[in-house]
Amino acid sequence: MRKTFLLLSSFFLLIWLTAINTSAKEDLKSAIFAGGCFWCMEADFEKFPGIK
């Protein structure tokens, strides 16, 4: 009985953590820019709010 409880608890915890992880990523979007030097472009874009 204890093994079954631990197995089911672990299963539901894994599902719950996966759902939290995927919902946090839904707000992210990506864009591709061509601009030569990566570090020069990165520094300019990091000045804007919301860009990671």
Image: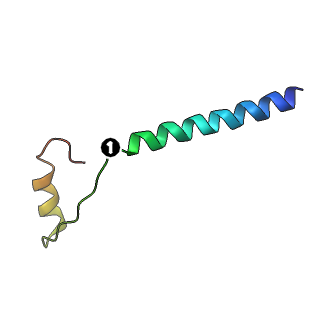
Q: In this view, does 49 lie to the left or right of 12?
A: left
Residue 5: x and y, percent? 80, 28
Label 1: state its secondary structure. Answer: loop
Q: In this figure, which residue is indicated by the disc labeled 1?
A: 27
Here the colouring is rainbow
Q: How many labels does the image show?
A: 1
- Disc 1 marks a residue whose amino acid type is Asp
Mark 1 is surrounded, within 10 Å at the Cα level, by few (under 14), some (14 to 19) or many (20 or more) other residues, namely: few
Of residues 15 and 10, the one nearer the viewer is 15
Residue 16: x and y, percent? 58, 34
Query: Which image quarter: residue 33?
Result: bottom left
Residue occupying the point 71% across, 34% down: 10
Q: In this view, does 1 lie to the left or right of 38?
A: right
Query: Which image quarter: residue 3?
Result: top right
Single out the residue that lies furthest toward the right. 1
Residue occupying the point 9% across, 55% down: 44
Q: In this view, does 38 lie above or below 9?
A: below
Residue occupying the point 90% across, 26% down: 1
Q: In this view, does 10 lie to the left or right of 28?
A: right
Query: Which image quarter: residue 41?
Result: bottom left
Q: Is residue 47 above or below residue 38?
A: above
Of residues 43 and 28, the one nearer the viewer is 28
Residue 50: x and y, percent? 20, 42
Residue 45: x and y, percent? 13, 53
